[in-house]
Amino acid sequence: MTLLRHPRSWSCQWLPILILLLGTDRGPGVQGVTHYKTGDPVILYVNKVGPYHNPQETYHYYQLPVCCPEKIRHKSLTLGEVLDGDRMAESLYVIRFRENVEKRVLCHMQLSSAQVEQLRQAIEELYYFEFVVDDLPIRGFVGYMEESGFLPHSHKIGLWTHLDFHLEFHGDRIIFANVSVRDVKPHSLDGLRSDEFLGLTHTYSVRWSETSVEHRSDRRRGDDGGFFPRTLEIHWLSIINSMVLVFLLVGFVAVILMRVLRNDLARYNLDEETTSGGSGDDFDQGDNGWKIIHTDVFRFPPYRGLLCAVLGVGAQFLALGTGIIIMALLGMFNVHRHGAINSAAILSYALTCCISGYVSSHFYRQIGGERWVWNIILTTSLFSVPFFLTWSVVNSVHWANGSTQALPATTILLLLTVWLLVGFPLTVIGGIFGKNNANPFDAPCRTKNIAREIPPQPWYKSTVIHMTVGGFLPFSAISVELYYIFATVWGREQYTLYGILFFVFAILLSVGACISIALTYFQLSGEDYRWWWRSVLSVGSTGLFIFLYSVFYYARRSNMSGAVQTVEFFGYSLLTGYVFFLMLGTISFFSSLKFIRYIYVNLKMD
């Protein structure tokens, strides 16, 4: 690849090229509409096949024994289409604009018993095919299967050898395309001997009709006989559940917690005034609660480099998630395809690496970190290494099974180039700016050299209980909406309610911040000043609940099966939980830090 020949000039030359390569993904149905004249050829591309219930298990259409040209010519694809498993190739179908065709022969085939068995297995696994006409995807099932009766049992399998294509046009543009087998009888694949060949004749028809719809986006969703189901209604149960939880939590923090804090501050400050004439050595005499640990609460934690890396990468994913949702709200993605979002996520991840470097290095320098280079390496590896390991396993399984989800070598080199020439340098640049702009930590209380002994804590103030409470409440705020998101990513639903998604995302962050403040207050009230890592783990454990929900979804809410789909599902679900841990752990930590600064700034001390 020419992208790797001149690495020294990346800063001025390759960044615009990479942005064009990654940012121009538009996917079928979004690219510029082609204008035709009557009789102009309309190219139909065959794309992929796969089990209906395993969305991420797809294979090239020509891997099945079907009508295939002598020389297969593939269409050049965008990065998003490649990541989505698309492998478009020209077909033998001859379609001309506004010219109807009745039962034209596509090809004659003689199938061996092994090829027939391959088709039978595909039909039994509910394989569907996907074609593309003028960037419009059309889908249908490969064959027909019928199960009937118990005694005697009937098991019939048939192959669709005739396809009816229905295309709608407005003026000189194609608006809609579909395929049907409604009035077609399947060709039986039963009763073939092992030494016998099966003769097949594949045919097709093309019917054109004019429509009053001027643009593809104007066509009402759901009136196109869509192959995949749609979920377009606003799920009010999820919204009401989330709003009630937020109001309760915000009310708890704002009313109860602030009243307790006001009483604590008044009592502590009054005690300070009455004892101000005494010796400073008696400052802690008779005191208890969070005031007594004021000399330890800002004692820097162990593993500060790892903590700063978590905060940096978490801040990056917060910016990345917010940006993706905002772009979706602005209508920058095709709702019917995932390719555009994949490309935008890759480009956005690379460009937001500067945020992780800045936040991590800035806070690391504030809390007295000295190994700056190691901190940058840890920050840039905290997500990229787990992601690479997971992807390597998933991609190897796809490659071993011949799935189109396995990325080609050129795409892998392109993604590696993006990380090496954009992501990693921006992390370093952000780290340099963060280190140089870091101010002293400026803690409101002076920290003693000798740490105070922490009294024994009751069981309900343990880390496990805090993680359970801190993870379950934010998860419960998004649990209903999470089903629709999983049904979109791992199923056949089409998610279009990005406004609701943005609202739920904001609720998730708000609930996480409130829970973090409440749990931190309870921890400090028990004279336990080890809040740094506890605040990250308490709300960050929401990621664990999300992964557990993914296990439940796989077992109870989906029909996925097979090694290919299972490995991809659990591999990327584990990564998703990890990303939520980083995001919510970051929100939790900075909320707790802001809260602790507030209460100790308002505490009168010598």
Image (tube, rainbow, N blue to C red):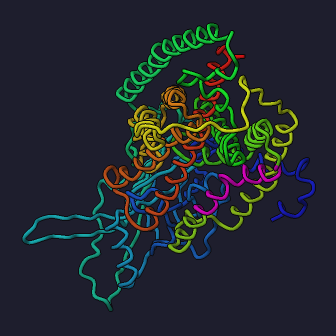
How far from the left and from the top, in percent, is residue 570?
47, 58
Q: Which residue appears farthest toward the bottom when viewing the image? A: 195
Q: Quadrant of residue 587?
A: top right
Q: Nearer the viewer, residue 299 or 143?
A: 299
Q: Which residue appears farthest toward the front when viewing the image? A: 279
How far from the left and from the top, in percent, is residue 24?
71, 45
Bounds of the magenta segment:
371-391
How far from the left and from the top, in percent, is residue 567?
47, 63
190 left or right of 262?
A: left
User: What residue is drawn where x is 61% and y is 71%?
Assistant: 72
Helix, strand or loop: magenta stretch: helix
User: What residue is drawn where x is 80% and y is 65%?
Assistant: 1
106 left or right of 281?
A: left
189 left or right of 414?
A: left
Q: Is 460 placed above or below 179 here?
A: above
- Residue 374: say if magenta: yes
Q: Nearer the viewer, residue 373 or 107?
A: 373
User: What residue is drawn where x is 58% and y is 53%?
Assistant: 42
State the count of labels. Answer: 0
Q: Nearer the viewer, residue 60 or 242?
A: 242
Q: Quadrant of residue 447?
A: top right
Q: Nearer the viewer, residue 250 or 41?
A: 250
Q: Is 261 placed above or below 550 here?
A: above
Let me know if residue 112 appears in the view.
yes
User: What residue is drawn where x is 65% and y is 66%?
Assistant: 408
How far from the left and from the top, in percent, is residue 353?
74, 44
- Residue 263: say if magenta: no
Let me know if residue 507 appears in the view.
no
398 left or right of 316?
A: left
Quadrant location, the C terminus = top right
